[in-house]
Amino acid sequence: MKAEDVLKRHGLKATKSRLEVIRVFLDSGGPISHKEIIENSMLRLDRVSVYRIVNAFLKKEIIHNAYSGGRNPLFELTGRGGANHCHPHFSCRMCGKTTCLDGVAFYQKGQLKKGYIAERQKVLIEGLCPKCR
Amino acid sequence: MKAEDVLKRHGLKATKSRLEVIRVFLDSGGPISHKEIIENSMLRLDRVSVYRIVNAFLKKEIIHNAYSGGRNPLFELTGRGGANHCHPHFSCRMCGKTTCLDGVAFYQKGQLKKGYIAERQKVLIEGLCPKCR
DNA sequence: TTTTCAATTGCAACAAAGTTGCATTTATGA
DNA sequence: TCATAAATGCAACTTTGTTGCAATTGAAAA
């Protein structure tokens, strides 16, 4: 489906800025930060607008917050290529780069205490990437 | 082992501030933020000192960064009560409270891509706690 | 196509989180 | 107890994120 339709279906105007942010996400190789959105944009996007666009996309679950090793949150498109919300990530402790882990899954053993409701599982593997090891 | 000895064994001076930060950690029921350290301290700790103490403890692995759902990092004592670094956490999306998950473990299925070295696994379950559901 | 109007953007100002340099204080070993 | 390196507190700064408001723009109706 076209980005424009995705936005409209969620009741969001298909503005240049929003379409560009989606393009940056599609173009990225993994979860990205607010800063990376701005740096990788062809348009001059205002910092505040990026925060607002990200928040709007989060609320509509067009994107979601991936568990990042570092200080700043990283976001990625929800359901990209059929991936569900809960795929695990890898973060290199040397270069800080975070990528999606394909072909790896995690299984829960044991039950949550009574009364707790699990909605989403976030897994991050920290270690060294091939370049940094 | 006494907190004082833990510090000395890592080559850190056993100052009042550091001992108090350790006391706050021991007193806490789960991972805590910089702000919570300051708020729960009996001493008047300077904000900057808390950042420096936390960083020193992180480097020595006296504490580690627990995967938090929210915006700010949360820390907890390493190896507390025999727990290893990698125990999973639960974060409530309503009240934001993060707690340690006991009696739950996660098993990996599948291999990392060639060249990647996994050192630590961080798991966060997001959902609703008994109070908020 | 043009008009209209709410939604969105950019800017300025602010708030919160984290860092750095430096003078003062403190823990520890001699 | 004394000397000294390590740690602290303070001021100033950077980075990250938020809010209010005026100007702009997308989209629906005329």
Image (cartoon, coloured by chain):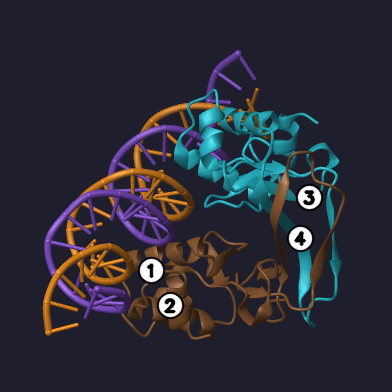
Chain colours: A cyan, B brown, C purple, D orange
Could you say whether the residue bearing mark 2 is in a helix, strand or loop?
A: helix
Task: Please state, as top left, top right, bottom left or bottom right, where the C terminus of chain A lies in the image.
Answer: top right
Q: Amino acid at mark 1?
A: Val
What chain letter is assigned to the residue under label 1?
A: B
Residue C11 percent coordinates (x, y): 34, 35
Q: Which mark is residue B50?
A: 1
**Both labels 4 and 1 in a single chain:** no
Residue labelled with disc 4: A121
**Both labels 2 and 4 in a single chain:** no
Residue shown at 54%/41% (left/top)?
Answer: A34
What chain letter is assigned to the residue under label 2?
A: B
Q: Is residue B44 left or right of residue B94?
A: left
Please identify, in this view, whether the residue under mark 3 or under mark 1 is nearer the observer.
1
Please identify, in this view, whether the residue under mark 2 or under mark 4 is nearer the observer.
2
Residue labelled with disc 2: B21
**Both labels 1 and 2 in a single chain:** yes
Residue labelled with disc 3: A87
Residue A67 percent coordinates (x, y): 66, 53
Q: Are marks 1 and 2 in contact (CB under 8 Å)?
A: yes
Could you say whether the residue bearing mark 3 is in a helix, strand or loop?
A: loop
Q: Is residue B52 visible?
A: yes
Classify mark 3: residues with Cα within 10 Å, few (<14), some (14-19) or many (20+).
some
What is the C-alpha distance between the residues marked 2 and 4? 31 Å
Looking at marks 1 and 2 on the same chain, the residue that comes earlier in the sequence is marked by: 2
